Amino acid sequence: MIQHSSDTYVEQIDSALKAYKSKHPDADIKVKRHNSAAVWICIVDSIFEGKGLAAREEEVWPILEQLPADVREEISMLLLVPPSEANDSLLDSEF
């Protein structure tokens, strides 16, 4: 799940998202340290199909809220997409 370099923040986020993965085994979850101040998360899961952005966040954010505030503050991008949207050029180039 961790892409590229890792640190304690990335590892904590990755560990927290294992709870999501256990309930959604087909989900593709990637956590990436983008730069020194930003962690990006991308989750591709069929459960997001047909849902708006707020509904998608409701599936994941309760897990992320359990992280310490300083860890959550590192998250600058949270992409929650169904497989039908996974061929976006941003996803291809960044994840």
Image (cartoon, rainbow, N blue to C red):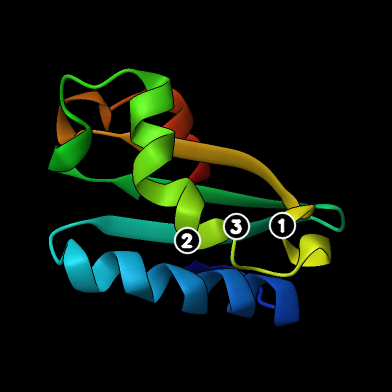
First-in-chain label (2 vs 1): 2
* Residue 72 disc label: 1
Position of 37 relative to 50 (above/below):
below
Residue occupied by mark 2: 63
Left or right of residue 31, residue 75 in this image = right
Residue plotted at (49% across, 73% down): 16
In the rendered image, the vertical position of residue 67 relative to residue 60, given as above or below: below
User: In the image, is residue 47 above or below residue 15?
Assistant: above
Residue placed at 25% from the left, 25% from the top? 85
Q: In this view, does 41 lie above or below 76?
A: below
x then y, percent, for residue 46:
13, 40
Tell me, yes or no, whether the two marked residues, 3 and 1, touch with CB atoms within 8 Å.
yes
Which of discs 2 and 1 lies nearer the camera? The answer is 2
Q: Which amino acid does label 3 sit on?
A: Glu
Q: Which mark is residue 65?
A: 3
Q: Position of residue 23 (x, y in %)?
A: 19, 66
User: What amino acid type should be assigned to the residue bearing mark 1?
Assistant: Arg
Report which quarter residue 8 is drawn in: bottom right
For marks 2 and 1, give the CA distance.
Answer: 11 Å
Residue plotted at (18% across, 61% down): 24
* Picture coordinates of residue 73, whole percent (x, y): 79, 52
Image quadrant in which the N terminus is located: bottom left
Instruction: Give residue 78's position: percent from left, percent from top.
Output: 54, 40
Q: Which amino acid does label 2 sit on?
A: Ile
Asked whether, in this view, residue 71 is left or right of residue 3, the answer is: right
> Is the residue under label 3 in contact with that under label 2 (CB below 8 Å)?
yes
The 10 Å Cα crowd at callout 2, few under 14, some 14 to 19, many 20 or more, is: some
- Tell me the element at label 3: loop
